[in-house]
Image (spheres, rainbow, N blue to C red):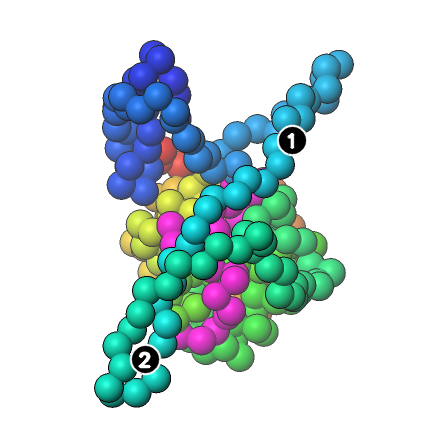
């Protein structure tokens, strides 16, 4: 995203595959950005300005009463409340694993892992060995292999780690939109023509992998050196297509 003029801006559309130039005539403009696409701010000598504002009374709110019987109709009731919101509860998921949205290393699994059992036996041990967060494609989440909170993609989390390992992920456009800005992408898929290889820096054409084979990939390739792996599986370096 860029600011071209006071009222002219550029922004990505179609999952980042095109850039749109737009003009806004609104006096107040609101922007949203993907934090993962920007380099972290460096410490400086000046302190950031903090502008604190008190919550304002937004006035009367309307809500609809539930229907109590077939003879009664819903009624609109205006209620003025001194409290704009009420704190109910908070539930936090505590994990020793790095947070998916901020992790420098991520191992994601897709539908190609075939089952939740194979997802857990392949993705989790590799993530543990690398000290990485765990992610999943939408197909894996929809199939019940992983929790919805682990979904990476246009309808999930957008990430840009130093290392992104895609295990059994074909590379649907909505998934690529969520991870294509990763610094180094390693793709493991049995289909050598899978779209994921178009954005991968390193590709391994293989089926379901054991943990030892996965670790062998990392120790022998050094992220760019062509190597061969036994058992008719091959490691290849891929040229990234931006």
- Report x, y in % for residue 4: 34, 14
Residue 3 in view in this figure = yes
Which residue lies at the image location 49% right of the left edge and 34% below the top edge?
37
Q: Nearer the viewer, residue 158 or 232?
A: 158
**Labels 2 & 1 near each other (Cβ < 8 A):** no
Q: Which corner quadrant of the image does residue 132 belong to? A: bottom right
Within the magenta stretch, is there residue 159?
A: yes
- Report x, y in % for residue 223: 56, 41
Q: Which residue is mark 1?
A: 52
- Report x, y in % for residue 194: 32, 55
Q: Nearer the viewer, residue 82 or 232?
A: 82
Q: Quadrant of the C terminus?
A: top left
- Please give the range of residues in magenta: 143-169
Q: Nearer the viewer, residue 130 or 75?
A: 75
Which residue lies at the image location 42% right of the left edge and 42% below the top edge?
180
Q: Residues within 10 Å of mark 2 (few under 14, many from 20)?
A: few
> What kind of element bears circle 2?
loop
Q: Which residue is mark 2?
A: 67
């Amino acid at each position: 995203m860029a600011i071209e003029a006071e009222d002219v801006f550029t922004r990505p559309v179609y999952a980042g595959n095109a850039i749109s130039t737009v003009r806004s005539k609104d006096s107040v403009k609101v922007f949203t950005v993907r934090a993962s696409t920007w380099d972290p701010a460096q410490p400086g000598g000046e302190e950031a300005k903090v502008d604190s504002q008190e919550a304002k009374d937004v006035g009367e709110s309307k809500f609809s009463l539930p229907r109590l019987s077939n003879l009664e109709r819903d009624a609109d009731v205006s209620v003025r409340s001194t409290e704009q919101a009420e704190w109910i509860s908070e539930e936090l998921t505590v994990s020793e694993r790095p947070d998916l949205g901020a992790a420098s290393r991520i191992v994601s699994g897709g539908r190609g892992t075939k089952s939740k059992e194979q997802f857990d036996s392949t993705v989790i041990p590799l993530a543990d060995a690398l000290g990485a967060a765990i992610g999943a494609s939408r197909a894996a989440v929809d199939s019940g292999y992983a929790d919805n909170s682990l979904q990476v993609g246009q309808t999930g989390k957008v990430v840009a780690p130093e290392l992104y390992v895609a295990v059994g992920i074909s590379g649907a456009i909505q998934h690529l939109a969520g991870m294509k800005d990763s610094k180094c992408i390693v793709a493991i898929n049995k289909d050598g023509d899978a779209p994921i290889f178009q954005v991968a820096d390193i590709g391994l054409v293989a089926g379901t992998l054991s943990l030892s084979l996965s670790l062998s990939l990392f120790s022998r390739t050094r992220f760019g050196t062509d190597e061969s792996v036994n058992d008719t599986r091959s490691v290849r370096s891929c040229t990234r297509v931006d």
